[in-house]
Image: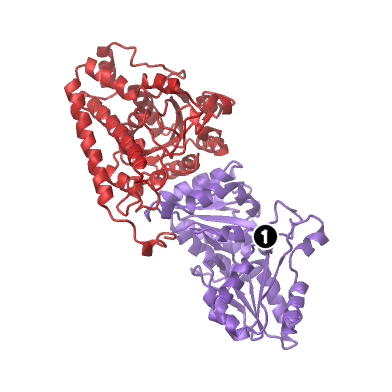
Amino acid sequence: MPEITYRGAIHDAMVEEMRRDERVFLIGEDIGVYGGAFGVSQGMLAEFGPGRIRETPISEQAIVGAAAGAAMVGMRPIAELMFMDFVLLAMEPLVNQAAKARYMFGGKAKVPMVIRMPSGSGTGAAAQHSQSLESILMHIPGIKVVAPSTPYDAKGLLISSIRDPNPVCFVEHKLLYKIKGEVPAEEYSIPLGVADIKHEGRDITVVTSGIMVQKSIAVARKLEAEGISIEVIDPRTLRPLDTDAIARSVKKTGRLLVVHEAVKTGGWAGEVMASVSESPAFDYLDSPMRRLTGKDIPIPYNRNLEAAAVPQEEDIEREIRAILNNQY
Amino acid sequence: MGTEKIKAAYDNLQTEDVLKKAKELGLDNDILVHMYRTMIKIRLFEEKADQLYALGKVHGTMHLSAGQEAVAVGAGFVTRDDDYLLNHHRGHGHFIASGADINKMMAEFLGKETGYCHGRGGSMHIADITANNLGANGIVGGGIELAAGVGLAVQMRKTDQLVLVLFGDGAANEGIFHESLNMSAIWELPVIYLCENNHYGMSAEVARVSSKVPFKDRALAHGIPGYFIDGNDVLAVYEFMKNAAEYTRTDKGPVFIEVETYRYFGHSKSDRNLYRSREEIETWKKRDPILRFEKLLIDAKLIDNVKVKEIYQEMGILIEKAVTFAENSPEPEIKDVMEWVYA
């Protein structure tokens, strides 16, 4: 299988879907000649022209509103927000319009749209360009939230998201854009709502997403040498959340750590732990469930402070050891 | 089209000149009477809604458009069945004028399974997606948010449909107003922005909360043709809408029409009319859109007082039938409450 980057995988998914289905188009800021703030749409203007690579003014509410409107009448827009932080400017059309149209109109509307948004810290972009806001989005019925951690998942999940008849928020951690991974040359897709075991293990389940999957896998590989066996579960879709897969793994390992970059309070780790508490898997737990999350602060600018604000590999390792040694 | 406000343009003409002008617009005598009939249908629907609320039969709120019928009919008689309509929360009249089934509307109003939205939306969210009627919207400016995108879809498919988006004076002070107008203008999207200035956003008087009026000036600032007209003159609304539709359908871009009108009922059911006087309301009732059009049709001998009575009776029966239909309809089933969150 050829190796491509996460950025390339997302690019390829969009290009292939736009070739396949003329209803699909890309709308967002600086997506044309510039190629997008993170270079994801490079070259697409040349192939598809300004009609379908629809470069917009800096008007996030209008971008998402326009995507929702176009989707309601049968188009399949992909809206690119330059940073996930900017979805806050577009919560009105996303939450009050796109997410609710189907329900409040009695099942007659469909809003097949994707909003792609680069998330997360690690680039020195500070408080307003580094957030992980997926928990806020997960709280809204009618929206799906997808957060791939590998190039393979990114392409397969984006294709499914574009074909999905609902509004999908597609969260791309910006530190993942450069990572490489195997992606098949032939067409494939990954169903939404299905978790993936990124690393099999027996001793503890780590449920995690986005960049934290990469970090958790690195820890799992490192501790393997000591005979510590870690199961890394990537839900891939945060809403709907594959609680069955999580429960299955917890039954097997008897321990659970949830790791996310988003801040702790109200974060989706709580949702994962609640789902286990409510399931028969709870009886299999050998120790309290734990979460390792971003600190409850805005992301700071200074390199060292920024790194301290979110879980790093050594934090994950330390937390896993603590749980396995019953030290918490 | 001029850019200045026209006051009672048709009222000031001689009757024969009015009919001549109407003919030029493509309105024959039958259509004129049908427009009048539709205005009465709307008025009686709204009055019935108010009564049903007073009788305690309505669970939620409502925003009634009595007094604004000329806008609904003037616009609704211009748009085609395949055009897209994005409505505001005071939208009963526009649905009726665009040919909606009042049985299903009334059933939705009463929260019944047979309503347009199976009782999930209520008065504020009546929609008929299959008829390109994309819904009333509970968020002020919500339709404006979606309008450019619907226009974009039309443009990309290269059809000659248009998008009619309705909103009130209040929505003109939402940020999305400018984002949407700018977007439609730069892409020359087929959107008609119809601003229903009824003088109050809930209790906020337009002049007190708006830096620049009329709002059509804000459209001009975006390079969009903008007009400010008498919204209680159904023929004036029709004329400007018709010209706007021709302009928009031929890929020239968006048009903005602001109509001046007035609502008789309060903003919603909680309104005690503390912000306006009885005299003001009575003054506006002298400019009532239905009475003005009625006088014109009687002067032109298209109808007489007997016919007027007949029409009221006929429309009244339709409304009563709608109420009966709605009241006899089943409630939605509790077991279905989780349906339709996702497609």
Q: Please say whether residue A150 is visible from this viewpoint.
A: no
Residue A220 spot, x, y in % from top left: 70, 80
The subunit letter for the residue under badge 1 reads A
| Residue found at the very far front of the displayed protein | B55
Q: Is residue B54 left or right of residue A24?
A: left
Query: In which quadrant of the rendered image does the C terminus of chain B lie?
Result: bottom left
Mark 1 Cα-neighbour bin, 10 Å: few <14, some 14–19, many ≥20: many
Q: Nearer the viewer, residue A22 or A49?
A: A22
Q: How many circles with numbers are drawn on the protein?
A: 1
With respect to residue B332, does A279 lie above or below?
Answer: below
- Residue drawn at 55 percent across, 75 percent down: A278
Residue A273, by quadrant, is: bottom right
Look at label 1 and name its amino acid. Answer: Lys
Residue A302 spot, x, y in % from top left: 82, 56
Residue A108 spot, x, y in % from top left: 37, 54
- Residue drawn at 70 percent across, 51 percent down: A128
Q: Please say whether residue B148 is visible from this viewpoint.
A: yes
With respect to residue B36, does B2 lie above or below?
Answer: above
Residue on which disc 1 sits: A174
What coloring was used for the rendering? by chain
With respect to residue A231, does B179 lie above or below?
Answer: above
Colour in which chain B is shown? red
Q: Which chain is purple?
A: A
